[in-house]
Image (cartoon, coloured by chain):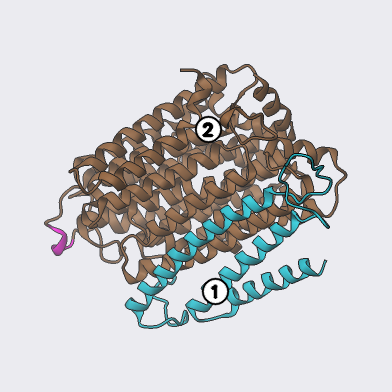
Chain colours: A cyan, B brown
Amino acid sequence: MSLYVLSLILFCIGIYGVLRKRNIVKIIMGLAIMGYAVNLFFVLLGYRLHGRAPIDSAGQDILNMVDPLPQALVLTSIVISLGIMALVISIAIRIYEKYGTFDITKIKRLKG
Amino acid sequence: MKGVNIIPLFVIIPLLAAFLISLLGRAVRNFSETLIGISSTLLLGFALRSVMLVKHAPIKALVYKIGGWMPPFGICMVLDGLSSFMLVVVNLIAFFVAVYSFSYMEKYTDKPKFFILFSLMVCGLNGLIITGDLFNLFVFLEIASISSYALVAFGTEAEELEASFKYAIMGTVASIFVFLGIAFLYGFTSTLNMADMAAVLASKPSTWILPFVSVLFLAGFSLKAAMVPFHGWLPDAHSSAPASISAMLSGVLIKTLGIYAMMRIFFNVLGINQGHLTVLMFLGAFSIITGAVLAFSQWDLKRLLAYSTISQIGYVVLGLGLGTPLGIFGGLFHLFNHSVFKSLLFLNSGAVDYASGTRDLRETGGFSKVMPITARTNLIASMAISGIPPFGGFFSKLLIVIACIQKGHIGYGLCAVVGSILTLIYFMKVQKFVFLGELKEKFKGIIEVPSVMRFSMVCLAFICIFAGILLLPSFRAFLDQAVNVLLNGTGYASVVMEAAVK
C-alpha cells in the first residue's frame, strides 16, 4: 500500500512542478516526474505478493506469478515519453535562443 | 481483396509514405509531393469504400484480427459505422490539405520533413479511429499528438516555438491523465480490449472506480478537444501553425483526439449515464458562448478562427451530450460540416497570408478585387458556419436546437441560437475588413494564389454548399450508421465479439 501512496506523492510533485514553476526546464522536469509516477503505478498494478516471473519451464508448476502485461505496456509508455522529452527539450533550447530566457513570465508574445 | 483486409491499410499507407519520404525525399525531386498525392488519394478511396463495406456487412461491424489472434487475447481493429464516418472526415480533409500544401509550403524551407510529419499525423488519426484496443488508442493518440507539436513549431520563429511549447505541455498532461485512466481500468478489469472491457464492466458491480476513471478521461480528452475551461493552448497553437496544419488541427485533430475518443470510451466502454451527459451539455453550451465572445474582439484573422473553433466544438459536444438520437445525429452532422468549413476558412486565411504577407484585420481590406476566388470561397464558408439556410451548417445547428427543445433544455437551445448569431457577426467583421472596402496602395500588386491552392478551396466550398444532401434518405446511411453505434452503447461489446467470430 505504501508504494501506491509513494507514486501518488510523486504524481503530486510532478503536477506541482508543471503548475507552479516559472522556469521552462523545471516545468519539463515536472512533466517527466508525472510520467514516471504513472508508469510506476502501472507496474505496481501487475505485482502479486510473492509472485515469480511468468516463465514456463519443464517440471515446474507456476502457482503464483506476476502479471507481465503492464511491464510491456510501461515499456511502450517510457519510449513515448522519451520522444516527448526529446521534442520538448529541443523546443526549449530554441526558445532560449530566440528569447534569451527560460522564464515563462517573460515569454509572452502571444496573447489575446 | 476481401473487405476486412482494407482495415490495416489505413495505418500502413501513411506510415509507409512517411518512411519512404524520409529515405528518398531529399534525393529525388518532387518525390514527396507525388507520394503524398498517391497515398492521400488511396486513403480517401478506401475511406469511402469502408462506408459501403459497413453498410453491406450483416452485423454492421468488421473486425480485423492482427496475427489471427481472437479479440480478448490479441489486438483487433474494428471498423463500424462511427469509425467509417470519422475515417471519411479525416481522409477527406487530409486529401485537400495535402493538395493545398504542395504550393503553400513553398515558403518554408524543408518540404519533405513537413510531409513526413503530416503523414505520421494522418497515421495516428486513422489508427486511433480504427483501433479496438484501449492501449493502442493511447499509442496512436501520442503519435498524432507528437507530430502535431512538431508541426506547430515548423516555422521555428519565436511565436511558433512559444505556442508549440504551451501545446506540448498541455497535451502531455492530458495524455498522462488518459494513461492513468487506462491504468485504473486495466487494474479493475484485467483486459485492454475495448469490447471485452465493456462486457466485464457490465458484469461487475459498480464501485468508486468508474466515476473516478470518467473524471480522468473527461479531463484528458477535454484538454485535447479544448473545451472551455481547458482551452488555453488552442488559440496560440492554431494561429501560429502553418495554415494547412491549422486546417488539419481545427478540422480533424481535436475532433478525433478529443471528441471521437471521448465518445467511444464513454458511450461504448464505460456506458453513458445522466451524470456524464449533464457535464457534457454544460461544457458544450459554456464553450459556445465563451468561444464566440472571445472571437469577437480578435484582430488577428487566424486567432479569430481559432476562437471560433472552440465555439463550434461546443455545438458538437452539446449535440452529443443530449444523448437523444436527434441530438447525436445533429452533433455528428455538425462535426462533419465544421471540419469542412473550418478547414476551408483556415485555408483561405493561409491564402490571404500567402498573397499579402499579413493577416492583421486592421491592415487588410478590399482583397475581393484582387483575389476573387478566395473572397467567394470565404463568403461561402462564412455563411455555412453562421448557419444561413441552404448550407450544411444551417441544418446541423437547427437539428441541435430542435433536439435541445425536444428534451426540454430551453436554456441550452437559446445558447446555441445566440452563439450562432454571434458567429454571424464576427464573420461579417472578417468579410468587411479583409475582402470589402478600399484596397490599400501597398496591396495593389498582389495576385490570386496558385491553382492547386485554388483547387482545394473551391472543392471544399462545393462540399460546404451541398453538405445538406447528407440528410436525404439515400445518403442518410452514412450518418445513421454512426449514430446507431453511439445509441447502441455497451451493446458494442456483443457486436464486436460477434463480428470477430466470422
Q: Is A100 on the left or on the right of A86, as rendered?
A: left
Q: Which numbered marker is on residue A29?
A: 1
Q: Name the residue nearer the viewer: B462 or B151.
A: B151
Residue B239 vertical position relative to residue B4 in the rendered view, above or below: below
Q: Is B398 placed left or right of A61 in the picture?
A: left
Image x and y of residue B256, in percent: 53, 45
Relative image position of residue A100 (x, y in whole percent)? 35, 82
Please state the horizontal and vertical placement of residue B220, each as a whole percent of the image. Answer: 62, 57
| Residue range corresponding to the magenta coloring | B440-444
Query: For residue B85, which numbered disc appears in the image?
Result: 2
Q: Is residue A41 left or right of residue B395?
A: right
Secondary structure of the residue carrying tag 1 is: helix
Q: Which residue is drawn at 67% across and 33% down?
A: B325
Is residue B472 at least partly visible in the picture? no
Q: Which residue lies furthest to the front in this view?
A: A59
Task: Mark 1 and mark 2 in contact? Answer it, CB < 8 Å.
Answer: no
- Residue B210 in the magenta stretch? The answer is no
Q: Are marks 1 and 2 on the same chain?
A: no
Q: Main secondary structure of the magenta part?
A: helix
Q: Could you tell me residue B103's position as x and y percent?
A: 22, 46
The one nearer the camera, B425 or B97, is B97
Q: Mark 2: which amino acid?
A: Phe
Residue in the foreground of this view, choosing between B303 and B184: B184
Residue lying at 52% horizontally and 55% vertically, measured from the top left: B310
